[in-house]
Image (cartoon, rainbow, N blue to C red):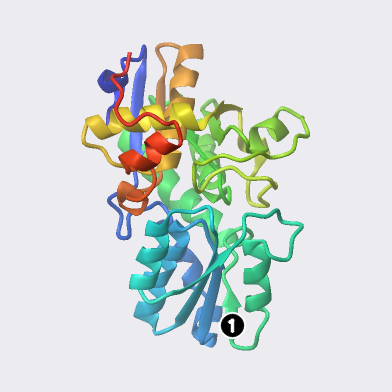
Amino acid sequence: MDLTELFGVEGTLLAKLENESRTGSVKDRPVRWMVDDPRTDQAHTVVEASGGNTGISLAVAGRELGKRVIITMSRKMSPGKVRRMEEAGAEVVLCPCVGLDSPANFINVAQRLGAEEGVWYVDQFNNPANVAAHAEGTGPEILAQVGDGLDCFVAGAGTGGTLTGVGRALKRRRPGIEIVLADPVGSILAAHLRGEQVEGGPYLVEGIGGDFLPPLLDFDVLDGAYEIDDLESAAHLAVLREAGIRVGSSSGTAIGAALAYLRDNPGRTVCALLADAGDRYLETWQDEDWLTGHGLPVMLSHP
């Protein structure tokens, strides 16, 4: 989708929309690849640690395969994600918002559950099929849709699978293309790319960033990063909402980074990946009272 006119930029701003995929997010892509594994057949229960979107997709896949699905997730995430997973038959274990050094962290809880007999921990944070899905699928698809005029690809990083896989695919075809990380203020990923060591802080955007370095994120494929705060992410989501495009919170961050790139590189063509649909944020990022209560804009006319 071409968002150039909507945001009034000097250059071309394209969006790779993943909100109309089967379960409404980009995570349908790696889940298809990850469950195509002998360990799925051998297990009676499949476990995953998720910010929500992988959990939703895996819950649907698990139901079709006749598997019990358990998803561990931080309490920070939207209630709509829990509802979608439970509607698909998954069991959801909500964990406190604590760092990876705590045994109560949602990833550590999933690892313990996955160590039980007959249980397979899919482990999207380390599973190479996560990257392969994007290197073999999403990246070539973007090239086919956009063509050789693309100068930059922008996305957030949760597991890092999307950014790494797409980045590698694009650079194989066009070595000069720039791969840019969209990172929430409070995450440590952009700082790490700059060679800085910082402590993570709180932020409201879901599914991207973090207080640890995801093993699948190949920092060597990245050419730059922009840090976008919650206020700016919400402002861009408001513009998209006014245009009838209801997407998730990380999409506002991706748009913010793409706009920042175009300010620094006017006239270029950039594609931002908008990772999920807004339907799982009805109680949060799509709710006027929630936005107002957090000091975030509900509607905004873009300059």
Q: In the drawing, does residue 223 fall left or right of residue 80? A: right
Q: Nearer the viewer, residue 48 or 199?
A: 199
Q: Please say if 95 is above or below 248.
A: below
Circle 1 residue: 119
Q: In the drawing, does residue 157 fall left or right of residue 259? A: right
- Image x and y of residue 286, in percent: 32, 43
Q: Nearer the viewer, residue 9 or 292?
A: 292
Q: Say if residue 205 shows up in the picture.
A: yes
Q: Say if residue 28 shows up in the picture.
A: no
Q: Nearer the viewer, residue 159 or 113?
A: 113
In the image, what residue type sits under mark 1?
A: Val
Residue drawn where x is 53% and y is 47% of the image: 165
Q: In the drawing, does residue 153 fall left or right of residue 86? A: right
Give the quadrant of residue 95: bottom right
Residue drawn where x is 35% and y is 64% of the image: 84
Q: In the drawing, does residue 136 fall left or right of residue 288? A: right
Give the quadrant of residue 280: bottom left
Q: Please say if 42 is above or below 279.
A: below
- Image x and y of residue 59, in percent: 41, 71
- In this view, the residue farthest toward the left is 244
- Image x and y of residue 203, in percent: 56, 39
- Image x and y of residue 238, in percent: 32, 30
